[in-house]
Image (cartoon, rainbow, N blue to C red):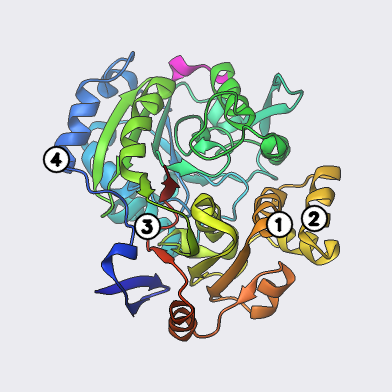
C-alpha cells in the first residue's frame, strides 16, 4: 500500500505493508452540528448556554498549537452568543502569540468580526490575581482579565497528553491563562513518576491544574469539550460543568487514540500532524507517545516539518550543556525551568532507545540532543527493512497512543 505522511505542506509517499500502519481507530460519528447542539441542549450540572452567558462573558479558546476545531464550534454557537458583549482570550499558556495564520485557524470566518474583541494571553506580561498556593506549595496566579469576568466559557478538545494525562478541561485555565511562574512550577511536577500519558490518578500535574480550577470557581464556567476522530471530525461533545464534561470525554478519547500492537517493534516512525508540527518543541509529543511499543535498543523516528523551527530553545540548550542524557536528567532535577519537561522526557527515552529525526530543522540541533538526523527518509527505511527490522508507522503520532498487551 502507499502511505502518505504529512511533512509541511506536502505528503511523503511510502510503499509499505498495510499491517505495519497504525492510524487512529475508526469510530462512528454523527452529524457534527447535531453532536454539538445535543451537548448544548443537555449540559452537565449547568444552566443552558443561553441562560448562562451574559454581558462581560469571556470565552477562552485554545491557541494554534492545538487541533481543537474552535472555528467549527464557533459557527454553531455564534447565533447564541453574538447578541452579547463578549471577549475572547486565546489560552497560549507560555507559548508565543499566534500569527495571523494561527488566528485564522482558530477563529475561521469570524476572525474579521471578532478581532477587536480578542486578547492574546501573555504569561509574562499580563496582570494576574493570586489564588494562593496548591498542595505542592506552587503559586496559583491567573489572568486578571479572566478572573474579573462574571462568566467564563471554555472551548477545548480532549486528547492524550504526555504528562498531564489528557489535554482539555482544566488546562484552559492552567496552563492556558495562568502566569509564567504558575505554569513553570506546575510543569516541574513532571519529575514525579505518576505524571504520565493517560493517567489522572495521583498525577500531580493534573491535580495542580484541577485545584486551580476549583479555586477559581467551577460554577462560573460553562465548558464545551469535544473529542475528534481520525479525520478531525467531532466524535463526541459534552458541555456544562468543566470537570464533569472533561471526565465524560476520557472514554471516547481512549476509543480513538489507544491502538493495540501484538508485539514491540524495532523502529516506530511517528509523524506530527498539523498543527503539532509547528515546531520541534511541540512535535516532541509524537516521540513520547510511541515510546512504550519500541524495544529496548530500538529507535523512534520522528517525521515533522517543524514549520517555525525549534520553538522554545531551553530544552535544547540544557542538552548541549549536559553532554549526555543521564547528565541532562540530573541538571533538570537540580534546576527546573519551563521547557525542561521536554528535556526530561526525551532524556528518559534516550537512555534506553535511539531517537532519529527527519525534520525541517538543522541536523546540528538534533545532534545536540543526541538524536540522529535522517537526511533521506525513504533510503533509510529501505535499508532498515533489508536488515529485517520490524517497523511500525504512526502517521498521526501526535494523537496516537500505541500499546502492547
Residue tagged by mark 4?
Answer: 30
Q: Where is residue 41 in the image (x, y as percent from the top left)?
A: 20, 23
Residue tagged by mark 1?
Answer: 351
25 or 8: nearer the viewer: 25
**Whole-Å distance between the Cαs marked 4 and 2?**
49 Å
Could you tell me what secondary structure mostly forms the magenta stretch?
helix
Q: Position of residue 350 (x, y in %)?
A: 68, 59
Residue tagged by mark 2?
Answer: 326
Residue 153 against residue 43 in the figure, above or below: below
Q: What element carries label 1?
A: helix
Which residue ends up furthest to the front in the rendered image? 388
Residue 185 against residue 20 in the figure, above or below: above
Q: Are the residues flagged by discs 1 and 2 in contact, CB closer than 8 Å?
A: yes
Q: What's the mark number on residue 235?
A: none
**Whole-Å distance between the Cαs marked 3 and 4?**
23 Å
- Magenta-colored span: 216-221
Residue tagged by mark 3?
Answer: 105
Q: What element carries label 4?
A: loop
> Which badge, 1 or 4, comes first in the chain's sequence?
4
Q: What element carries label 2?
A: helix
Q: How crowded is mark 4: few (under 14 residues within 10 Å), some or many (20 or more)?
A: few
129 or 164: nearer the viewer: 164
Q: Can residue 10 be seen in this view?
A: yes
Residue 358 against residue 265 in the figure, above or below: below
| Residue under the image location 28 percent in, 36 percent down | 82
| Residue under the image location 31 percent in, 49 percent down | 71
Residue 319 against residue 188 in the figure, above or below: below
* Camera-nearest label, 1 or 3: 1
* Camera-nearest label, 3 or 2: 2
**Whole-Å distance between the Cαs marked 1 and 2?**
7 Å
Q: Position of residue 7 (x, y in %)?
A: 42, 73
Amino acid at each position: 500500500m502507499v502511505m502518505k505522511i504529512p511533512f509541511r505542506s506536502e505528503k511523503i509517499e511510502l510503499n509499505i505493508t498495510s499491517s505495519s500502519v497504525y492510524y487512529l481507530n475508526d469510530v462512528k460519528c454523527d452529524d457534527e452540528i447535531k453532536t454539538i447542539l445535543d451537548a448544548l441542549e443537555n449540559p452537565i450540572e449547568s444552566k443552558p448556554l443561553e441562560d448562562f452567558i451574559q454581558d462581560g462573558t469571556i470565552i477562552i479558546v485554545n491557541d494554534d498549537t492545538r487541533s481543537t476545531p474552535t472555528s467549527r464550534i464557533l459557527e454553531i454557537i455564534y447565533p447564541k452568543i453574538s447578541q452579547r458583549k463578549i471577549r475572547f482570550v486565546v489560552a497560549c499558556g507560555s507559548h508565543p502569540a499566534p500569527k495571523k495564520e494561527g488566528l485564522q485557524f482558530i477563529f475561521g470566518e469570524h476572525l474579521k468580526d471578532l478581532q477587536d474583541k480578542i486578547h492574546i494571553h501573555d504569561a509574562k506580561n499580563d496582570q494576574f490575581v493570586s489564588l494562593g498556593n496548591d498542595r505542592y506549595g506552587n503559586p496559583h496566579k491567573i489572568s486578571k482579565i479572566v478572573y474579573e469576568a462574571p462568566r467564563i466559557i471554555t472551548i477545548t478538545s480532549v486528547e492524550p497528553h504526555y504528562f498531564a494525562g489528557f489535554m482539555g478541561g482544566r488546562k484552559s485555565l492552567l496552563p492556558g491563562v495562568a502566569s509564567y511562574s504558575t505554569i513553570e512550577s506546575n510543569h516541574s511536577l513532571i519529575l514525579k513518576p505518576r505524571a504520565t500519558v493517560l493517567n489522572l490518578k495521583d498525577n500531580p500535574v493534573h491535580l495542580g491544574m484541577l485545584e486551580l480550577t476549583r479555586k477559581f470557581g467551577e460554577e462560573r464556567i460553562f465548558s464545551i469539550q469535544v473529542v475528534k476522530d481520525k479525520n478531525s471530525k467531532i466524535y463526541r461533545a459534552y458541555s456544562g460543568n468543566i470537570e464533569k464534561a472533561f471526565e465524560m470525554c476520557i472514554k471516547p478519547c481512549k476509543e480513538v487514540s489507544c491502538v493495540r500492537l501484538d508485539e514491540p517493534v524495532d523502529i516506530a516512525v511517528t509523524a506530527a500532524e498539523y498543527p503539532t508540527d509547528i515546531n520541534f518543541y511541540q512535535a516532541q509529543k509524537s516521540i513520547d507517545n510511541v515510546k512504550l511499543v519500541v524495544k529496548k535498543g530500538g529507535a523512534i523516528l520522528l517525521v515533522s516539518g517543524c514549520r517555525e523551527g525549534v520553538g522554545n530553545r531551553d530544552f535544547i540548550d540544557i542538552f548541549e550543556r549536559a553532554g549526555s542524557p543521564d547528565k541532562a536528567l540530573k541538571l533538570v532535577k537540580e534546576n527546573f525551568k519551563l521547557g525542561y519537561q521536554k528535556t526530561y522526557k526525551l532524556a528518559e527515552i534516550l537512555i534506553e532507545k535511539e531517537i532519529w529525526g527527519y525534520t525541517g530543522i538543522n541536523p546540528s540541533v538534533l545532534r545536540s540532543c543526541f538524536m540522529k538526523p535522517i537526511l533521506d527518509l525513504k533510503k533509510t527505511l529501505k535499508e532498515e527493512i533489508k536488515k529485517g527490522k520490524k517497523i511500525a508507522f504512526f502517521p498521526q503520532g501526535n494523537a496516537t497512543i500505541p500499546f502492547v498487551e
